[in-house]
Amino acid sequence: MNETYREPIYNMKLVAQETGVKPNTLRAWERRYGLPRPARTEGGHRRYSQSDIEIVKWLLDRQQEGLQIKGAIELWRSLEADGQEPLQSRPTSESSFSLETTGQTMACLRQEWVSACLACDERKAGQILIQALALYPPETVGLDLLLKGVAQIGRAWYSGEASVQQEHFASQLAVRRIEALLQAAHPPTRAGRILVACPAEEEHTLGLLWLTYLLRRRGWEVLYLGANVPTARLEEVTRTTRPPLAISAALRLPTAATMLEMARSLQQEGIPLAFGGRIFNRLPPLRDRIPGHFLGSGLEQARRSVEELMTAIHPTPLPKPITEAYRQALGHYRERRLLIEADLAQNPDLFQKPWFPAINRELGRDIVAALTLGDIDFVDDSIDWLAELNNDGYAPAKILDDYLGAYYQTARKRLDERGAPIVNWLSGRVGVSSNEGGK
């Protein structure tokens, strides 16, 4: 760079006009972080060079990508410590990186971030994120590093190679980063507020949070309510805000059932629901049980579907009706569930197993959810998921079969003809003939 580029010739007023950063902010950055580093006249007045102006613009770019000013300064220092010139380190649209090279680089960054999360090293994980944001747009970092990284750790937990604590650690880091990106998003430019909320009992927010960010980046006003939103609270918010669209997601069968309650409440208020989530990807027939618009199996597809719903009127699809037999089975099972579980607790071969309380609780919740949604066969997905787990907190497949056999025998004793959907389903799971399965 030539000497003119570094010559301190501009006063603070001009720098503020050029960058949009207020003089008080420039002074605070200099005082706290030492950036930029203006020269001083004999009278003590600050004088900035073109290089100083570019530094300020560089820091502003990092803030637009979701970094706080402290993180942007840390990135600058890190690049300098590695012998790089920060103003020349970020690729532009004219850079010569190939797709193969950038894809491989992101894969390496993601693997380093996953390793840092598994080691519960928050500082290193944060540094890797800062490096990724210096190289890639925030949309790429969010999807290819954060979401795919958390999914990779989730698969490791599923196979017994990671603990639930490690999975929670990574998820919370990802949530905090996406929340920081949301804070840096531009004000909305499109008409119409979108309400986003997880149904009651749903604690997994990452997918909805990222969809919120994608929509805000596209100029939509999004009111994000977060995890585990009771229907009563949602009703209060909708009466106040009257959004033209609500969005929700469920990962497990029980929260798909609470989403059904949410959808019915919104329907009464005349507010359409758009929905998605892992359980609807695993069980496509479940989509027909929710009075709403299925958004698709991917987040980018979901974003496009939301924009289409916001720009054109689409009648809400009617759900498949719940039969009277299922309504009776649901009420009857709720009455007798505690008796069934109490009987199972008397079985020493089951009760003394460390996995028994969790399995007993989850199966009961899944049966209630399946009956609520109108198809007891939906429980198969949850049972198959548990059987495939290689995790100390859950029962291996053979033990799970033994547990279901005991549950079947107890259900036959405690349920009358109203419980036929449950007893018949259990008989199929444990391989009992239909004649033996009846009373």
Image: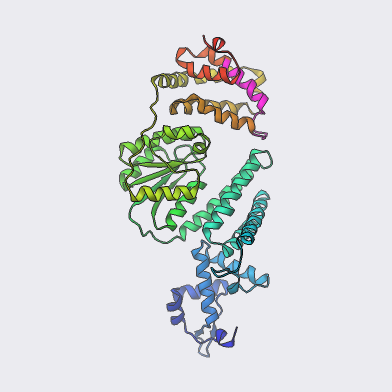
> Residue drawn 56% across and 66% down?
72
Residue 432 seen anywhere in this rendered image of the structure: yes
Residue at point 60% right, 21% down?
Answer: 404
Residue shown at the point (39%, 22%) measured from the top left: 323
Which SS type dominates the magenta stretch?
helix
Image coordinates for residue 112, horizontal then vertical, percent: 67, 55
Which residue is at 53% across, 27% downward? 379
| Residue 359 rendering spot, x and y as whole percentages | 59, 28
Tell me which corner region of the image, top left, top right, bottom left or bottom right, holds residue 186.
bottom left
Quadrant location of the N terminus in the rendered image: bottom right
Front position in the image: 190 or 333: 190
Q: Is residue 342 visible?
A: no
Judge whether residue 394 is colored magenta. yes
Q: Is residue 165 above or below residue 182?
A: above
Colour scheme: rainbow
Residue 283: % across, % down: 51, 34
Total marks placed: 0
Q: Is residue 412 left or right of residue 200?
A: right
Residue 161 % position (x, y):
69, 41
The quadrant where residue 389 appears: top right
Nearest the viewer among 230 and 373 is 373
**Location of residue 32 by image quarter:** bottom right
Q: Is residue 205 above or below residue 346?
A: below
**Is residue 128 highlighted in magenta?**
no
Determine whether 267 is above or below 245 in the image.
above
**Residue range corresponding to the magenta coloring:** 389-408
